[in-house]
Image (cartoon, grey):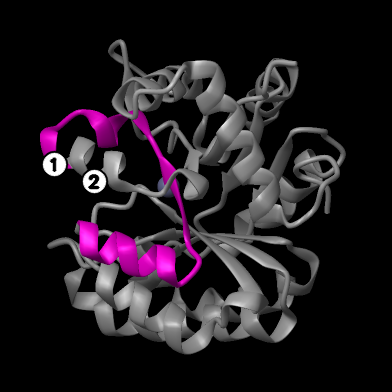
Amino acid sequence: MKAALVDFHCHLDLFPDLASAISAAETAGIYTLTVTTTPRAWPRNYDLTRKTKYIRAALGLHPQLVAERSAEIKLWEEYLPHARYVGEVGIDAGPQYYRSVDLQKEIFATILRKCAETGGKVLTVHSVRAATAVLDLIESHLPRHRGQVVLHWFTGSKSEARRAADLGCYFSVNAAMMRNERGCGLVAALPSDRLLTETDAPFTRADNRSTSPSDVKATVEALAALRRETPENMAHMISSNLRAVLGDAGAPLDD
Ligand SMILES: [Zn+2]
């Protein structure tokens, strides 16, 4: 049996047409987690994906939007009982967002605490220039048995990656992470049983166009080459890691 592909972090609601982006991923049979950047966007994403076999929607409050939208944490909390997947959430300490970093930390801590309270959530987490801060908050607020964290586009150091793995985190890897030497070194060092794939579509590019979930195929191939595996083995590994993240032996994205 051929293993199904996995795109564990993309933004289908930023495609020109959400419904057709969902149906393209569904037809291709790619297990896809589509994230939202504000809780206001979640109900429509949830409605359009809940009956699909392969696509699920995550309830997010993007760290880059926290400066203007921190008040939407109330709405995020209101929807949380209905959401199994949470994201995009986290911290961005890059130069453009650095000013709101304290507020971002506060919001992220609240999100982690609420997820710990309800239990059983799967989070896709942004940590640009903030790996240590993100890991500190996860360690303090989300005990390992109360939720599952997947670090999206992780660019921390190898020792931060080891710490993340020790805390139980997974890593969703995209093709852009393997386009420079430092990134390749980091991706090569991640533990095999913690790897997932993602595109972050439409924000990444392949062949001079913006990406879509089907571009994870090339990511699996690049990952396989980097780690000296066959693409088939790599795809199997990723799909069994997905099952482990979701903690059930049934259909990978059932909720
Ligand atoms: Zn994203």
> What are the residue bounds of the magenta stretch?
158-182
Q: Which residue is at a point 56% across and 36% down the rendered structure image? A: 238
Say if 27 sits above or below 138 in the image: above
Q: Which residue is mark 1?
A: 182
Residue 127 occupies quadrant: bottom left
Q: Position of residue 37 (x, y in %)?
A: 50, 56
Q: Secondary structure at mark 1?
A: helix
Q: Position of residue 175 (x, y in %)?
A: 34, 28
Residue 19's tag is none
Answer left or right for 203 relative to 46.
left
Q: Position of residue 189 (x, y in %)?
A: 28, 46
Crowd tier of the residue under label 2, counting other residues whose Cα lies within 10 Å: few below 14, some 14–19, many 20 or above:
some
Looking at the image, the residue that sits furthest to the front is 228
Q: Residues at badges 1 and 2 in contact (C-beta under 8 Å)?
A: yes
Between 93 and 164, the one nearer to me in the picture? 164
Q: Which residue is mark 2?
A: 186
Q: Secondary structure at mark 2?
A: helix
Q: Which residue is at a point 44% across and 61% down the rendered structure image? A: 62
